[in-house]
Image (cartoon, helix red, strand yellow):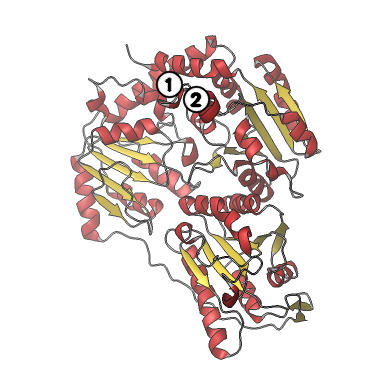
């Protein structure tokens, strides 16, 4: 431990409790009011610190690190509007169930609203996006102050890490002077632990649920945004072996098996109105975060199942499909582990029917790709299989993640993105943070608008050559050309698609990134090996596709999948 430390006792309380709660990384943005925190974390050899100037990018960077590590990550900023720039990433962390710990410096309470510099109402600025807000005392003057501060910091970490994990906000007012130092005094800081009970359904509850399983010939399991879990994968594979069970997963579900249906949209697109009831479930079991596919949401809402169970530990009542009958307060791993042990096959062709249609749609998919012209869809058909085995994939939002949903068999079994709130801001910064933690290659596929919007992700001294960015340069928000509504109005190009020229090469040069470019199938095939092999710098591959063609190709693709 460094000899000299911040002389603010409350800072030592925060850092010691943070370390004992497995907080190993802190992202700091420069400022003066947060000097006591910055000095303390920088001098604490138990914590790795990262300094990023742009608070919005810094927060997404921390989010990416927490995604990969499954551990809390700290965020430290100065007073004033600095904290407000954390809001997009904190909201994303909330809906992804990720424990970011925001520690903001503040002016003393008596100076708020007194026209003093950087003295805004920041105590509850993130209230709607965090699990808890904790206003710490301005100083520790005695035993009661110390007890109170210790209790609040313990409560913050317990809140972040218990049940449904998520971000919390510690607001810490400091009086000047801010840069005082004192010798670090080793203290046995009190830690309050939450003991989580063993996750088990009662015998009565398990029996009631298994009775429904045994009486249902059509059971649909739907996985939303989920962190990789080997235990959940094994349990679902066993459950999906039952003839009455179909498991639907998405790219960001991080669950893949020959037994699962992993390309939801291309299968459901083929259902005619007459045959749709054959594929509707009697029992729907859903878990995880948001679901990308609008088609599956629309399908289930149009014909609600008899039973719908949502599985999640500490979750609120989430009724995405307007059909919820049971909310089961267990982790998906614990739930399926117990359910599988009691489930038995029943006479049903439900799984066989889904799998047959999945196979038919795969043939149509391949046939269309064989003849289609150069476009976003064609580019994705080359990009996704090219990802090196063992890499981690980060996907941007809007059209990028939706294209990824149309393909199966991607070598990257670990796929993340910002699908909690689904904004385009922060995709690059999140991926950059992920690449710092993961020792293999992190591949980001993003759109040109998102790449430009979050360009401060590359104003970052921690990037390595393991970070690879693929930019789909299609001239703007292409998704608005093939969703109902925007594509039908004359303002589409200016007000929705916002088509504009983005110079990817110049941005890459400005941030000293290795640059590659492809504008057709042949040049993409030629560029990919060199792009992945780049070992000196982070690399950007610009993949240019025709803006006026992409929507036409995608519409033709979905038409080719429809049953005639």
Residue tagged 2: 492
**Vertical side of 156 occupied by 289: above or below:** above
Mark 2 surroundings: few (<14), some (14-19) or many (≥20) residues within 10 A:
some
In x, y percent, where is residue 221?
Answer: 34, 40
**Vertical side of 122 occupied by 277: above or below:** above
Q: Quadrant of the N terminus?
A: bottom right
Quarter-of-image position of residue 19:
bottom right
Decide if residue 361 is on the left or right side of residue 317.
right
Judging from the image, what secondary structure is the residue with disc 2 in?
helix
Distance, label 2 to label 1, CA atoms, is: 7 Å
Residue tagged 1: 488
Q: Quadrant of the C terminus?
A: top left
Quarter-of-image position of residue 122:
bottom right
- The answer, for residue 190, to whether it is visible in the render is yes
Rendered residue at 30%/54% (across/down): 328
**Vertical side of 442 occupied by 474: above or below:** above
Q: Residue furthest front?
A: 115
Rendered residue at 32%/32% (across/down): 298
- The residue closer to the viewer here, 552 or 327, is 552
In x, y percent, where is residue 444?
Answer: 63, 37
């Amino acid at each position: 431990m460094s000899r000299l430390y911040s002389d603010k006792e409350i800072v030592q309380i925060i850092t010691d409790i943070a370390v004992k709660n497995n907080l190993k990384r802190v992202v700091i943005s420069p400022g003066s009011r947060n000097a006591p925190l910055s000095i303390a974390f920088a001098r604490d050899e138990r914590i790795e610190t990262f300094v990023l100037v742009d608070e919005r990018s810094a927060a997404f960077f921390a989010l990416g690190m927490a995604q990969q590590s499954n551990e809390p990550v700290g965020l430290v900023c100065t007073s004033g509007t600095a904290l407000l720039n954390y809001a997009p990433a904190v909201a994303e962390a909330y809906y992804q169930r990720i424990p970011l710990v925001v520690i903001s410096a503040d002016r003393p309470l008596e100076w708020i609203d007194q026209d003093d510099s950087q003295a805004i109402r920041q105590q509850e600025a993130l209230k709607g996006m965090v699990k808890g807000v904790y206003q710490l005392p301005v100083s520790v003057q005695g035993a009661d102050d110390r007890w109170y501060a210790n209790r609040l910091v313990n409560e913050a970490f317990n809140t972040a890490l218990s049940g449904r994990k998520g971000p919390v906000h510690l607001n810490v007012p400091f009086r000047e002077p801010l840069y005082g130092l004192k010798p670090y005094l080793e203290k046995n800081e009190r830690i309050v632990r939450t003991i989580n009970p063993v996750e088990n359904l009662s015998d009565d509850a398990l029996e009631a649920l298994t009775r429904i399983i045994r009486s249902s010939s059509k059971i649909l399991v739907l996985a939303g945004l989920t962190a990789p879990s080997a235990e959940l994968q094994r349990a679902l594979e066993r459950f999906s072996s039952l003839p009455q069970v179909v498991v639907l997963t998405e790219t960001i579900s991080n669950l893949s098996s020959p037994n699962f249906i992993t390309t939801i949209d291309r299968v459901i697109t083929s259902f005619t109105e007459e045959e749709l009831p054959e594929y509707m479930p009697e029992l729907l079991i859903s878990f995880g975060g948001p679901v990308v596919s609008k088609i599956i949401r629309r399908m289930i809402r149009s014909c609600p199942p008899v039973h719908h169970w949502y599985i999640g530990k500490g979750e609120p009542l989430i009724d995405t499909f307007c059909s919820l009958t049971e909310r089961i307060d267990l982790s998906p791993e614990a739930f399926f582990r117990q359910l599988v042990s009691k489930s038995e096959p029943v006479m049903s062709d439900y799984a066989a029917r889904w799998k047959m249609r999945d196979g038919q749609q795969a043939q149509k998919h391949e046939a269309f790709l064989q003849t289609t012209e150069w476009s976003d869809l064609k580019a994705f058909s080359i990009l996704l299989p090219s990802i090196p085995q063992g890499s981690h994939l980060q996907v941007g939002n809007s059209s990028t993640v939706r294209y990824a949903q149309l393909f199966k068999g991607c070598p990257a079994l670990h796929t993340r993105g910002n699908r909690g709130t689904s904004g385009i801001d922060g995709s690059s910064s999140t991926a950059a943070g992920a690449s710092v933690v993961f020792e293999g290659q992190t591949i980001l596929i993003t759109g040109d608008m998102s790449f430009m919007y979050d360009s401060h992700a590359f104003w970052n001294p921690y990037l390595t050559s393991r970070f690879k960015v693929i930019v789909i340069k299609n001239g703007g928000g292409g998704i608005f050309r093939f969703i109902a509504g925007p594509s039908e109005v004359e303002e589409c190009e200016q007000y929705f698609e916002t088509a504009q020229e983005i110079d990817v090469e110049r941005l890459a040069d400005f941030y000293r990134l290795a640059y590659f470019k492809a504008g057709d199938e042949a040049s993409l095939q030629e560029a990919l090996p060199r792009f992945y092999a780049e070992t000196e710098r982070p690399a950007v591959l610009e993949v240019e596709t025709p803006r006026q063609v992409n929507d036409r190709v995608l519409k033709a693709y979905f038409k080719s999948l429809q049953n005639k």
